[in-house]
Image: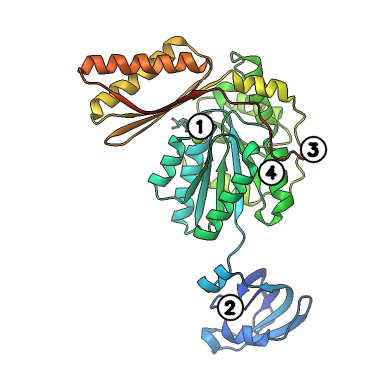
Amino acid sequence: MKVITLYYIMKNGRGEQLETATTTFLHGSTAISASLQSQLAGLHPGDRKIIQLKKGAEGADDDFTFDVTVTAIRDATPDELRLGRYLPPVKIHLQSGFLGAGKTTAIEQACLLLLKQNTPVAVITNDQGAQLVDGHRFSHLGIPSREVIGGCFCCNYDYLEENIHSLTSTTHPSILFAESVGSCTDIIATVLKPLLLRHPEWQPTVSIFADAHLLDDYTADPSIRYIYDKQLQEAQVLLITRSEAFSAQWKQQIQARYPDKIVLFHNSYHEPDIQRWLDTLAALPPCPALPSLDIDYEIYAEGEARLAWLDQEIAIDSQQMANRLMETIDNKIKKENYPVGRLKFWLTPTTLLINARVQTDPHTLSQLVADAIAETAAQDHRPIHTISHKAFQPGYPRPTHRLA
Ligand SMILES: Nc1nc2c(ncn2[C@@H]2O[C@H](COP(=O)(O)OP(=O)(O)OP(=O)(O)O)[C@@H](O)[C@H]2O)c(=O)[nH]1
Ligand SMILES: [Mg+2]
């Protein structure tokens, strides 16, 4: 069985041109009328033929003429044979941007909107740690998802590609979002270009998210700011979140600061903004020749090493106690006034998963959480048991591929 791609010009009985389009279908499927398909028999790539659909045939309300050029023919894949339809290649949209910039929220809202529009989606989340709140968010929503854990996409490129194949072969998404860890940069050279080289049909794009309040905030460590600035440089589409309260003049200045980028002032909780982002991605040229970053890996590694990662799962069956504990951890982090402090929780009836990414060292962060647990346990006169705990600093980034 073959999959056929053709270009056609459709005219009505009066010779008026109604449509020009390229379409791809599995031969024998119901995607194209049976009588049209029978007239295409024997054609090869490059062949051109005028075919007719007579008024009354297959519900046609006029005589139609199709000037058809066959552009490609290939064997159907086993999945296409099994499902009885053409499966278009997935489109891959990469999301990057600093910790807490709004990547997951945008992906979540985009997935919900696309599912409403009957577009199948899938998501890959990524982190240096092993237990991800973000991953839980998608599985909880029933959105097909996978996790690339234990390091950024760049250093786990093969694992990323394996997960893309796993999702495309099982759930057949039309669009796949891949969110890279918030401390990662250089994804054009280490992820986008290898994807483009190996799978141009996936047409990968890069969106960078940035919190409006951080664009001109230079209080973070210079090596962390270096990562942040490098992330912004990589944007094909730059989404500025939480910018609702900023003036039109400020927005114009930001737009002017990034003349080569598509800048969207974006609120993920506003559906038209999500649609505008999706439309922007759909309209991007298929193989953008984006420049790889000029980047100093020593500074990049130093910036990542300034951050402490903590993943801790605890057994807790009281919602009230869990709420108090979350609040205590949050307050302690705020009190220390760390320049970077990102805190996420995933609460189930019996467990609480804590993901904390903070500009401090792993020991201090572990102690802070341990103190919060001890305080909460003492207040309620009930012990709180840790199921798993891991605190560390990200290692030196060593990408699997790097294409200059
Ligand atoms: N006002 C506003 N808040 C947002 C927007 N997007 C995300 N948020 C909020 O910002 C916080 C962080 O959002 P996430 O989507 O988890 O950010 P992230 O970039 O995925 O974070 P990490 O994965 O930890 O790096 C959440 O509290 C969101 O509700 C937005 O467009 N506008
Ligand atoms: Mg996220």
N-terminal of the two: label 2 or label 1? 2
Alpha carbons under labels 1 and 4: distance apart: 22 Å
* Residue 356 appears in the figure: no
Residue indicated by mark 1: 129
Q: Position of residue 168 (x, y in %)?
A: 55, 57
Amino acid type at image mark 4: Leu
Indicate if the residue with disc 4 has its beta carbon within 8 Å of ligand 1. Answer: no
Q: Marks 2 and 1: which is nearer the front?
A: 1
Whether tag 4 and tag 2 are in contact, CB under 8 A, the answer is: no
What residue is drawn where x is 64% and y is 70%?
24
Amino acid type at image mark 2: Ile
What residue is drawn where x is 55% and y is 35%?
150
What residue is drawn where x is 72% and y is 25%?
297
Residue indicated by mark 3: 404
Q: Position of residue 391 (x, y in %)?
A: 48, 23
Alpha carbons under labels 3 and 2: distance apart: 44 Å
On screen, residue 275 versus residue 197, left or right, reads left
Q: Marks 3 and 2: which is nearer the front?
A: 3
Residue indicated by mark 2: 32
Furthest toward the left, the residue is: 381
Q: Marks 4 and 2: which is nearer the front?
A: 4
* Residue 112 appears in the figure: yes
N-terminal of the two: label 3 or label 4? 4
Pick the residue in front: 73 or 286: 73
Residue indicated by mark 4: 192
Amino acid type at image mark 3: Ala
On screen, residue 276 versus residue 366, left or right, reads right
